[in-house]
Amino acid sequence: MATVILALAAGPGFADGSPGHRYEIELSLDPGGRPDAAAWLADSNPWRARRIVPEAAPVQGDVQYDPDHGWSIRFYGASAEGPDAPETRFDCGPDPVRPGEYVTVTEPDGREYTYRVVGVG
């Protein structure tokens, strides 16, 4: 299991990005460095995630995987709890998850942001 740290690179209202806006996501990576769906399906423990924004407490959540829709994060305390909670989708693209690569994050309202991988550990 690796902790992947993403920092906001660009998006609506953040043309120059914002290193204070981050996600910390626990992922198991396959030998090619991509999120491992088989490991997620086999693991009975939740893969944790946190959203960090300036001047606010971190928001806790967990990683979800759906073979038809890909990877997402379900945040606790959202307007709907449990399986119906709004999800924040993330797409790592075709490249391995490693520092310097980019991830597209789509918020529940449909706004897309680009995050840069700044750490994998």
Image (cartoon, rainbow, N blue to C red):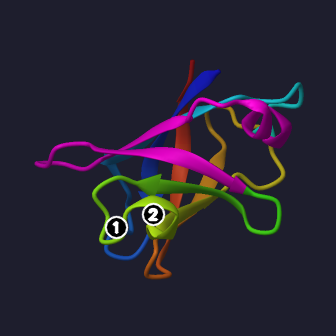
Q: Is residue 114 above or below residue 117?
A: below
- Stretch in magenta: 37-65
- Circle 2 crowding by C-alpha within 10 Å: few under 14, some 14–19, many from 20: some
Side of 86 where 55 appears, left or right: left
Q: Secondary structure at mark 2?
A: strand
Side of 91 where 89 appears, left or right: left
User: Tag count in the figure?
Assistant: 2
Amino acid type of disc 2?
Ala
* Tag 2 residue: 10
Q: Is residue 56 above or below residue 16?
A: above
| Residue 60 picture location, percent across and down | 34, 43
Q: Is residue 43 above or below residue 115?
A: above
Q: Is residue 116 above or below residue 118?
A: below
Q: Residue at x 50, y 63 (%)?
A: 88
Give the camera-side residue of 95 and 87: 87
Q: Quadrant of the N terminus?
A: top right
Specify whether residue 53 is painted magenta.
yes
Q: Residue at x 81, y 45 (%)?
A: 95
Q: Secondary structure at mark 1?
A: loop
Residue that sits furthest to the right in the current view: 31
Specify whether residue 48 is painted magenta.
yes
| Residue 65 picture location, percent across and down | 70, 53
Q: Residue at x 28, y 57 (%)?
A: 77
Residue that sits furthest to the left in the current view: 55
Residue 61 - label:
none
Q: Quadrant of the C terminus?
A: top right
Amino acid type of disc 1?
Phe
- Circle 1 crowding by C-alpha within 10 Å: few under 14, some 14–19, many from 20: few
Q: Is residue 34 visible?
A: no
Residue 14 - label:
1
Side of 93 where 26 appears, left or right: left
| Residue 90 picture location, percent across and down | 61, 58
